[in-house]
């Protein structure tokens, strides 16, 4: 996806320097920085959650992984 964004003119030489040091492109340096920022913010949010919220999130993630094509009858579910 192509998006045009305004970048502060003072940042461009810094981005070019980092890209040259890493033998990369400015675009790749910016993408890496954005990925790092998003991961960092997600970790901050998870660390700020209470234990109950973390358990709820874990349950939600497990439910999303469940196969919805397989069904179990009520009799089979409550069979002792």
Image: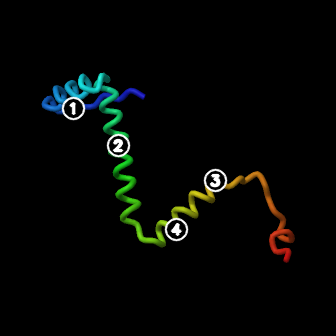
Q: Is residue 16 left or right of residue 76?
A: left
* CB-based contact (under 8 Å), mark 4 and mark 1: no
Pinpoint residue 67: horizontal percent, then vertical percent: 71, 53
Whichever of labels 1 and 3 marks the residue nearer the N terminus, that label is 1
Q: Is residue 70 left or right of residue 20?
A: right
Residue at image location 81% in from the left, 62% down from the top: 72
The tag on residue 65 is: 3
Tell me the residue that label 4 is attached to.
Answer: 55
Pinpoint residue 54: horizontal percent, then vertical percent: 48, 66
Pinpoint residue 18: horizontal percent, then vertical percent: 23, 29
What is the spatial separation of the Cα atoms under label 3 and label 2, in whole angstroms? 26 Å
Tell me the residue that label 1 is attached to.
Answer: 7
Pinpoint residue 5: horizontal percent, then vertical percent: 28, 31
Q: Quadrant of the N terminus?
A: top left
* CB-based contact (under 8 Å), mark 3 and mark 2: no
Residue depth check, mark 1 versus mark 3: number of the one nearer the observer:
3
Mark 2: secondary structure? helix
What is the spatial separation of the Cα atoms under label 1 and label 2, in whole angstroms? 18 Å
Mark 1: secondary structure? loop
* CB-based contact (under 8 Å), mark 2 and mark 4: no
What is the spatial separation of the Cα atoms under label 3 and label 4, in whole angstroms? 16 Å
Q: Is residue 29 left or right of residue 49?
A: left
Which of these two is toward me, 2 or 38?
38
Tell me the residue that label 2 is attached to.
Answer: 36
* CB-based contact (under 8 Å), mark 1 and mark 2: no
Which of these two is toward me, 45 or 73?
45
Mark 3: secondary structure? helix
Residue at image location 61% in from the left, 55% down from the top: 64
């Amino acid at each position: 996806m192509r998006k045009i964004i305004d970048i502060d003119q003072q940042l461009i030489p810094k981005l070019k320097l980092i890209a040259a040091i890493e033998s990369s492109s400015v675009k790749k340096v910016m993408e890496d920085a954005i990925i790092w920022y998003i991961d960092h913010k997600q970790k901050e949010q998870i660390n700020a959650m209470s234990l109950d919220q973390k358990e709820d999130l874990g349950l939600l993630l497990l439910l999303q992984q469940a196969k919805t094509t397989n069904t179990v009858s009520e009799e089979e579910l409550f069979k002792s």
